[in-house]
Image: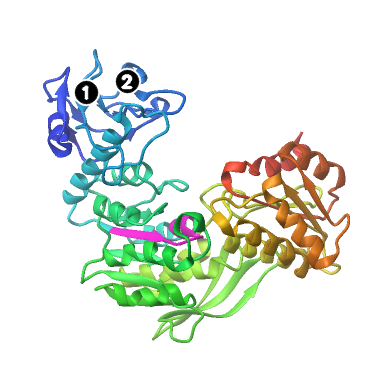
């Protein structure tokens, strides 16, 4: 963050000072975890379901924090007290355990502070990315492709909400040229609110799928929310839209910005042709622009990464990169965020595909297709396992969506389907109805049962995909399978 005195911070957020005259200057990072506080930093005192950050304010100062941004006065430490807000005010969600609204106040103040910093950085280009799936992987690719053009900041993992978004913004300083942000929504107006924190110059919409269908009611409702990103772009901005998704391509009418279409569609301005997949589902293709054709060979896994790479390419090209620079950067780009198409081969030849960070119908379909590609890349084909857990936030579409995934596993000729958790039972039933499966599909109650079954039955040469919504923790299955051989 740019250096700011506590008095300047109080002025920016409309807060008051407590236990300080405001002269101390924050020169370090802004943190909400005392374990990550460094000298010169600012600590965010956020209440939670189990602990309240206000109780750790003194500890944060002892660790080097210059002051604390809090929802109420904290005695004994220099504090900027955020002004009270309604719990649903602006983009400040209700936090579990936030009984007195202190957390909402801190989040609202954090957003104001982030905007203050952005306004002090006129040479900063803000890039926003949203979509039903692929946001984090695409954000990671964009950051790696832009890095050769100048200092680039991007969030770790999926820091894409009212806390992670401004927290990432405050990583930027005078040297930062590009700020790549991932934007999520749990309702209409959420993306629009995030765009007021760090107004984007470039906005990319990847797809409109079924994620959060329970909140939005329909894909059209999801499209309305995702399109808030392109509506926020200025007239001299750039909207990068997926030409292969009609609901996304249709957002061109909702923006004043220049529209760049990407995809395999012949009308796309940045296209991929001659796509081929290797033995681990890494794509090679020709990147086509209006004036150039350059080969790209991705190091990340899954055919869905082609669309992600095209989005990154289009953004970098419009921000000054040459087609060859883009191709080179994409070919060198690696997986950054954990539990997303992490392909690891054990010493005994078992390949583990850990894609357990999150799951929705579109991303599970893509992962199953990658599993089929990897297992059939050799002759004879390798035995394939799909270890799948529940997909969250599907609302009334829950049963049908899980049923369709079970049926798809059969149609893709996946050898073994392990369904984890009773909430995913329709997936198990769909597989049986589609293929009259017997022992090929099994329903187990939890992660421990899945691990026990796999340790007993997985054999050298097998390929095992693990995927579910993150809250179910199926990544523990993948890690247990890897630990079983390393010990």
Q: Is residue 433 left or right of residue 70?
A: right
First along the sequence among labels 2 and 1: 2
Which mark, residue 57?
2
Q: Residue 383 or 292: which is nearer the viewer?
A: 383
Q: Which residue has dot 1 on it?
A: 79
Residue farthest along the right direction in this orientation: 438
Quadrant in the picture for residue 76: top left
Image spot of residue 28 (x, y percent): 28, 33
Q: Residue 395 or 453: which is nearer the viewer?
A: 395
Residue drawn at x 60%, y 70% as measured from the top left: 283
In the figure, 351 relative to 66: above or below?
A: below
SS for dot 2: helix
Image spot of residue 2 (x, y percent): 21, 41
Q: Which residues are magenta?
A: 126-139
SS for dot 1: strand
Q: Residue 120 or 175: which is nearer the viewer?
A: 120
């Amino acid at each position: 963050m740019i250096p700011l005195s506590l008095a300047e911070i109080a002025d920016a957020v409309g807060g008051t000072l407590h236990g300080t005259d405001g002269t101390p200057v924050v020169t370090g990072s802004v943190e909400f975890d005392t374990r990550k506080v460094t000298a010169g930093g600012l600590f965010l005192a956020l209440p939670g379901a189990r602990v309240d950050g206000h109780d750790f304010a003194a500890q944060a100062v002892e660790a080097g924090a210059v002051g604390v941004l809090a929802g109420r006065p904290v005695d004994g430490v220099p504090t900027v007290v955020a002004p009270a807000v309604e719990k649903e005010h602006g983009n400040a969600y209700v936090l579990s355990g936030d009984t007195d609204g202190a957390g909402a106040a801190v989040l609202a103040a954090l957003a104001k502070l982030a905007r203050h910093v952005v306004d002090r950085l006129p040479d900063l280009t803000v890039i926003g990315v949203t979509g039903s799936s692929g946001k984090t992987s695409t954000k990671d690719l964009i950051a790696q492709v832009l890095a050769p053009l100048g200092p680039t900041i991007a969030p770790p993992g999926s820091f894409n909400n009212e806390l992670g978004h401004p927290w990432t913004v405050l990583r930027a300083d005078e040297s930062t040229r590009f700020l790549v942000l991932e934007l999520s929504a749990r309702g209409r107006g959420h993306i629009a609110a995030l765009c007021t924190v760090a107004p984007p110059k470039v906005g990319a919409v990847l797809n409109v799928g079924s994620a959060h269908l329970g909140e939005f009611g329909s894909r059209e409702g999801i499209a309305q929310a995702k399109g808030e990103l392109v509506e926020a772009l200025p007239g001299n901005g750039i909207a990068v839209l997926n030409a292969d998704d009609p609901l996304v391509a249709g957002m061109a009418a909702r923006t004043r910005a220049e529209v760049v279409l990407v995809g395999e569609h012949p009308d796309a301005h940045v296209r991929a042709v001659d796509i081929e997949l290797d033995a681990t589902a890494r794509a090679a293709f020709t990147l086509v622009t209006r004036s150039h054709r350059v080969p790209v060979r991705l190091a990340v896994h899954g055919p869905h990464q082609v669309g992600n790479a095209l989005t990154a390419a289009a953004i970098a090209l419009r921000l000054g990169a040459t087609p060859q620079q883009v191709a080179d950067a994409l070919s060198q780009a690696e997986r950054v965020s954990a539990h997303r198409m992490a392909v690891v081969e054990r010493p005994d030849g078992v390949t583990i595909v850990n894609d357990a960070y999150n799951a929705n119908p579109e991303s599970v379909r893509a992962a199953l297709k990658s599993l089929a590609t990897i297992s059939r890349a050799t002759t004879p084909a390798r035995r394939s396992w799909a270890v799948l857990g529940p997909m969250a936030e599907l609302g009334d579409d829950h049963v049908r969506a899980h049923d369709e995934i079970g049926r798809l596993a059969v149609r893709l000729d996946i050898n073994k389907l392990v369904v984890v958790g009773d909430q995913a039972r329709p997936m198990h039933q769909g597989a049986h109805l589609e293929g009259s499966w017997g022992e090929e599909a099994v329903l187990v109650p939890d992660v421990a049962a899945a691990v026990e079954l796999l340790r007993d039955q997985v054999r050298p040469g097998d390929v095992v995909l693990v995927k579910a919504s993150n809250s179910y923790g199926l990544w523990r299955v993948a890690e247990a399978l890897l630990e079983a051989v390393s010990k």
